[in-house]
Image: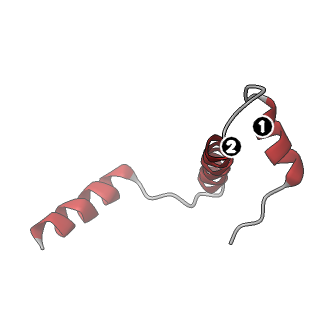
Amino acid sequence: MELLDKQKVLTYLSDMPDQFSAEEMLDRIITLSKIERGLEDVEQGRTTPHNEVIDKFRQWQQR
């Protein structure tokens, strides 16, 4: 389980309206943390080139 930074969560919530549901709050926190993790993966080179993804998808379709 990935731990969240309290300050980042507060930043995520600061743009939300004054009233929101718990579900909206959780969706926002999860979505933004996944986006940040993805951007970090790109910076660290932890990505798969598009053509490799297409090849793997085609192989998967043939099964």
Q: Quadrant of the N terminus?
A: bottom right
Label 2 secondary element: helix
Q: Residues at badges 1 and 2 in contact (C-beta under 8 Å)?
A: yes
Residue 38 screen position, x and y as percent: 59, 52
Say which amino acid is labelled 2. Answer: Met
Q: Residue at x 65, y 44 (%)?
A: 32
Say which amino acid is labelled 1. Answer: Leu
Q: Is 51 situated left or right of 30 in this image?
A: left
State which quadrant residue 28 falls in. Answer: top right
Q: Which mark is residue 13?
A: 1
Closest to the observer, 15 or 60: 15
Residue 24 screen position, x and y as percent: 62, 41
Above or below, 8 against 59 in this view is above
Q: Which mark is residue 26?
A: none
Residue 42 screen position, x and y as percent: 59, 51
Q: How many marks?
A: 2
Tell which circle, 1 or 2, labels the residue nearer the N-terminal end. Answer: 1
Q: Is 22 situated left or right of 52 in this image?
A: right
Above or below, 63 against 26 in this view is below
Q: Residues within 10 Å of mark 1 (few under 14, many from 20)?
A: some
Q: Quadrant of the C terminus?
A: bottom left
**Coloring applied to the structure:** secondary structure
Q: Which residue is mark 2?
A: 25
Above or below, 34 against 10 in this view is below
Q: Residue at x 65, y 57 (%)?
A: 44
Label 1 secondary element: helix
Q: Residue at x 66, y 49 (%)?
A: 26
Closest to the observer, 38 or 1: 1
Q: Is 12 situated left or right of 33 in this image?
A: right
